[in-house]
Amino acid sequence: MKEVFETNAMVEKENLDVRTITMGISLLDCAGSDVDTTCSKIREKIIRHAGRLARTAEDISREFGVPIVNKRVSVTPAALVGASCCRSTDDYVKIAMTLDRTASEIGVNFLGGFSAIVSKGMTESDRMMMKSIPEALACTGTVCSSVNVGSTRTGINMDAVRMMGRIVKETAERTRDNGSLGCAKLVVLCNAPDDNPFMAGAFHGVTEADAVISVGVSGPGVVKYALEKVRGKSFEVLCETIKKTAFKITRVGQAVAQEASRRLGVPFGIIDLSLAPTPAIGDSVAGILQEIGLEKAGAPGTTAALALLNDQVKKGGVMASSYVGGLSGAFIPVSEDQGMIEAVECGALSIEKLEAMTCVCSVGLDMIAIPGDTPASTISGIIADEAAIGMVNQKTTAVRIIPVIGKGVGESVEFGGLLGHAPIMPVNRFSCEDFIRREGRIPAPIHSFKN
């Protein structure tokens, strides 16, 4: 009974939610010799597996009394599915539009997997798919795109990094009328996991089953509330409190995932226990860092506090579920975290400090708005820096950066909903053009040779 009351309090007062139920679906068997046949098979398979996903999630939410914020689908990377039938970028856009219409038809919030895995090299299909991204994101609403440009085992594909700087810039131009929003649905990754349920980096990896259910739980507000009760106590008490709270949060997600798996007849995949903030007051990772003892996120000690938080969240989560995966830890998206927004606005937090923080957190530079006139080569340089952190540290890193066309430092952009709003952050003005112009690959680090 005590646990029931605790969970109710988490939901009603502390912003506990299941951030997403994501069904991963393999589309490898949908690949055909022409794009129309492939699109028809894609629609049929997604509807067959995920047609009841949204309704089932709503039923479970109502019966369990736990908010399930998003219902999502991830699919096999489009560059693989379209390789046999796509002859032009227009063909890939047609696949993206099919995915978008199908997502709307079944009532999911986002669909991820308009993606390519090019960490070592690019096929012609990969290049076509990547070139189609700006138009695909401009003419769809639910589709999310990702490109994996590096890994610890292969190094960093700098040709892909250079190309993605231009694609991010073009996507911003294509969606300039709504705050360059297309870039909020585009992420560039290193060491991308096959089972991530969070957008925009979600895709259904080729190592996965035909269809799986994965759940992303969240609860920055719950952790912050728990830490308020031990304010000023030792690091041992601090760590134990975070760990125990993460355990409780993960158990809620585990219950929801197992029930969704049973009702939909789809195997349970993983729980991703990332602390994913929202613009809601009190639902902030930056707020947790302040409760740990920082005046603002970005103050000296921020990276150490974030490392502590990330580690304890994972330690608590892995005790609660045998199948923890995805990213798992703490997200630091600027536009989606009110505490991060305030830290940027008062000058406590810069892109350089955020980059340092990404060495110890779940992912990378996330939902950061920069001036619209930032050169494509500078964007590529930022991607390369973040990929290098992931490659050397054997972790997932990502860049979801938004050059807001027509806006500069001191202004802000409004995205709405979970995406929130973001102040335009200054970018280092010195050029990396000659570095980015070089062709080829940055080799894998020496510690990748472990066989």
Image: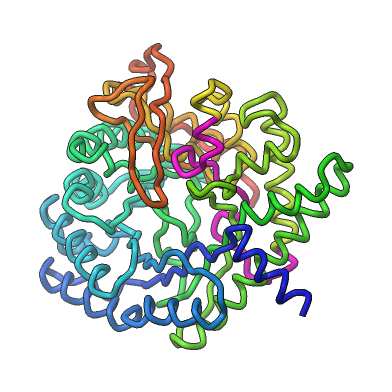
Of residue 211 and residue 300, the one placed in the foreground of this image is: 300
x then y, percent, for residue 8: 65, 71
Part of the protein shown in magenta: 318-342
> Residue 113, image x and y in percent?
34, 59
Q: Report the residue at 61% width, 39% height from top.
A: 286
**Quadrant hosting residue 210:** bottom left
- Above or below for 319 versus 426: below
Identify the residue shown where x is 53% and y is 66%: 18
* Residue 424 located left or right of residue 227: left
32 on left or right of 243: left
> Is 61 placed above or below 219 here?
below
* Residue 14 visible from this viewpoint: yes
Extreme-top residue of the structure? 430
Q: Tell me, yes or no, whether the highlighted magenta stretch contains residue 393.
A: no
Depicted 300 relative to depicted 122: above or below: above
The part of the image, by quadrant, that contains residue 131 is: top left
Residue sticking out furthest to the front: 13
Residue at x-position 41% and y-position 70%: 24
Q: Magenta span: helix, strand or loop, mainly? A: loop
Quadrant position of the N terminus in the picture: bottom right
In the image, is residue 329 part of the stretch drawn in magenta? yes
Residue 261: x %, y % from top left = 50, 82
Q: Is residue 294 left or right of residue 166?
A: right
**Camera sees residue 120:** no
Nearer-the-camera pick, 429 or 90: 429
Task: State the image coordinates of residue 49 (x, y, percent, origin top left).
Answer: 34, 81
Name the residue nearer the viewer: 336 or 436. 336
Residue at image point 31% right, 37% down: 164
The colour scheme of the drawn protein is rainbow
Figure disc tally? 0
230 or 89, which lies in front? 230
